[in-house]
Amino acid sequence: MKFEMTKRQVARGALPDAEVNNRMYLIKNASELRATYQIRLLLYRAVQEGSKLVLDVPKACKFSESLKALAKECRRNLEVTRS
């Protein structure tokens, strides 16, 4: 695995909140969600592994245009649940 480094030589990465079977769960409690580095990195990992990234957000959460475009592009590997 190749590690990317920041200017101060800190390895960058992201971990999901939970992993069960072939799914990675990321739980967010926000009123608006953007395509952050964490979401993009976990979605990339899901595409590479052939698994799914499940975003658990509140019912009132709105997605930014960048996240909508990313979800449309990778709809096979991204699932959104609203609670």
Image (cartoon, helix red, strand yellow):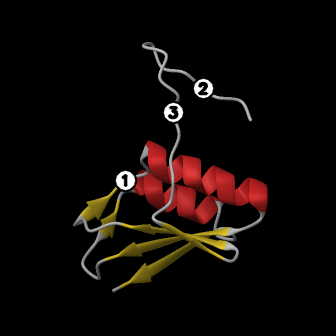
The relative height of residue 56 versus residue 64 in the rendered view (above or below) is below
Residue, disc 3 = 12
Residue 71: quarter of image: bottom right
| Mark pair 1, 2: CA separation | 22 Å
Residue at 37% across, 53% down:
34
Residue, disc 1 = 34
Q: Depth check: give the residue in front, 22 or 73.
A: 22
Q: Depth check: give the residue in front, 47 or 26.
A: 26
Identify the mark nearer the N-term, 1 or 2.
2
Amino acid carrying label 2: it is Glu
Identify the mark nearer the N-term, 2 or 3.
2
Residue 4, disc: 2
Which one is in front in this view, the residue at disc 3 or the one at disc 1?
3
Residue at 76% across, 59% down:
49
Question: Are the residues flagged by discs 2 and 3 in contact, CB closer than 8 Å?
Answer: yes
Q: Secondary structure at mark 1?
A: loop
Residue at 60% across, 56% down:
43
Q: Which x, y percent locates residue 1?
A: 74, 35
Q: Which x, y percent locates residue 58?
A: 29, 78
Crowd rating for badge 1 (residues with CA inside 10 Å; few <14, some 14–19, many 20+): some
Amino acid carrying label 1: it is Arg
Question: Are the residues flagged by discs 1 and 2 in contact, CB closer than 8 Å?
Answer: no
Residue at 53% across, 49% down:
40
Q: Secondary structure at mark 2?
A: loop
**Quadrant including the C terminus:** bottom left
Q: Secondary structure at mark 3?
A: loop
Which one is in front in this view, the residue at disc 1 or the one at disc 2?
2
Residue 50: quarter of image: bottom right
Q: Which x, y percent locates residue 22?
A: 70, 74
- Image check: 61 left or right of 76? left
- Image check: 44 left or right of 40? right
| Mark pair 3, 1: CA separation | 19 Å
